[in-house]
Image (tube, rainbow, N blue to C red):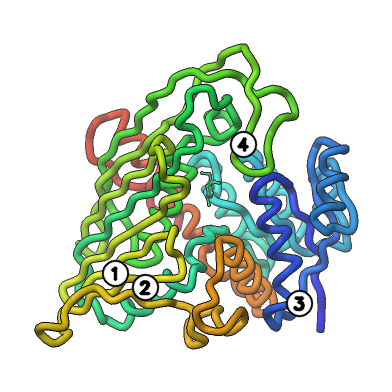
Amino acid sequence: MSEIGVGLVGYKFMGRTHSNAYRQVGHFFDVDPTPRMVALCGRDEAGVRDAAAKLGWEGYETDYRRLVARDDIGLVDVATTGNAHREVVLAALAAGKHVLCEKPLANTLDEAGEMLAAARAAKPGTVAMVNFNYRRVPAVQLAKQLIADGRLGEIRHFRAVYAQDWINDPSFPLVWRLQKDLAGSGALGDIAAHILDLAHFLVGPVTEVVGTLDTFIKERPLETAGAGGAGLSAAAGTEMGQVTVDDAASFLARFASGATGTFSATRLAPGRRNFNSFEVNGANGSLVFNLERMNELEVYLADDPPGLQGFRTINVTDAEHPYAAAWWPAGHIIGYEHTFVHAIKDLMDGIKAGQTPAPTFEDGYRCQAVLDAVERSSRERAWATPQEPPA
Ligand code: SOE
């Protein structure tokens, strides 16, 4: 049994979900290599030292350049604010490390292109993966299998809503996700990226979009220093600042397959804490997924006998389903954090095989290209074509 030293950059919300996944994966899956939690990295020494102790890391660093240079680290995991993805990923790849980068890959398409080029130029066997965790919900894997098996026939529509409400209160402070220079965009890159990646995973490439980006709350109180919560909470000061990103992203899409898509992402939907949902309509059936009922997939098959036709709710916890056998007996459901454990399991398998598990940096680039096209479409009020990945 081999092990691989891990260095994780970032220790807030995604840092916590990734730390939990590294701690748990070897206890529930047979992974080789197993991850060794060598060092957590963050600029604030008191903060990262306390987080390293709490989250189970052997040590910490306050400069990612030192982290990527360490000989006892073979995998660098990037869970930082979006503006730091590019520099940390490029440094880690240049140092010959495997890389996992949180979504979205970058803040701009140019950055994503640089990162894709660096991943392609890395020595053979280097893994460079993007973490779109919702692909690793067993119910989403079942949706993928049913579509791939042709059970729905020709896919005609993909319809997704990702709605949250954590910034609906105008007194919620101007955190990094609301600042373009740190986050790249708002709901578009943060949560529309998720339903777009699911669309790519389930239906295939998007070839054309038309959309609108809108900001409803245009200024917010500045965050008080050091108040950043571990999740989506924060403390507000009295000085006000400009919101420089979208609160909501809505767009239509055409797929290379001929299917059509509708996407709505907002963080101003009171009552929708983390409502990530999609519906797929094919010639012979439909699928409905709702993250708030993440262990279930609703399936309608048109060839069910007359009188017995209707959506059935499949509880996707039987051992036959992906990842399910590693956890609990059928019906004993799993949660959001398990999707990160599944991602790290697949990452370890990829490192052993020397093959990047999807989503690769090419998948991350394709997602970024559609986000970029939606931004152009919103500016120009016209259909826009996503940039193809460089050959
Ligand atoms: C905030 O919108 C957020 O934390 C996203 O950044 C995550 O990717 C999503 O899983 C939950 O909501």
**N-terminal of the two: label 3 or label 1?**
3
Q: List the residue tagged with mark 2.
A: 143
Cα–Cα span, label 3 and label 4: 35 Å
Mark carried by residue 82: none
Disc 3 from disc 1: Cα separation: 36 Å
Q: Residues within 10 Å of mark 1 (few under 14, many from 20)?
A: many
Q: Quadrant of residue 95?
A: bottom right
Q: CA distance from mark 4 to mark 1?
A: 34 Å
Q: Quadrant of the C terminus?
A: bottom left
Which residue in the structure is indicated by mark 3? Answer: 33
Please tell me whether residue 294 is drawn above or below residue 186 in the rendered image. below
Residue at the location (39% across, 26% down)? Answer: 215
The 10 Å Cα crowd at callout 2, few under 14, some 14 to 19, many 20 or more, is many
Query: Residue 296: x, y in percent?
Result: 40, 71
On whether ligand 1 comes within 8 Å of the CB at mark 2, the answer is no
> How many other residues sit within 10 Å of disc 4, few (<14), some (14-19) or many (≥20)?
some
* Label 3–label 2 contact, CB within 8 A: no
Write down the residue under mark 4.
Answer: 233
Is tag 2's residue or tag 4's residue first in the polypeptide sequence? 2
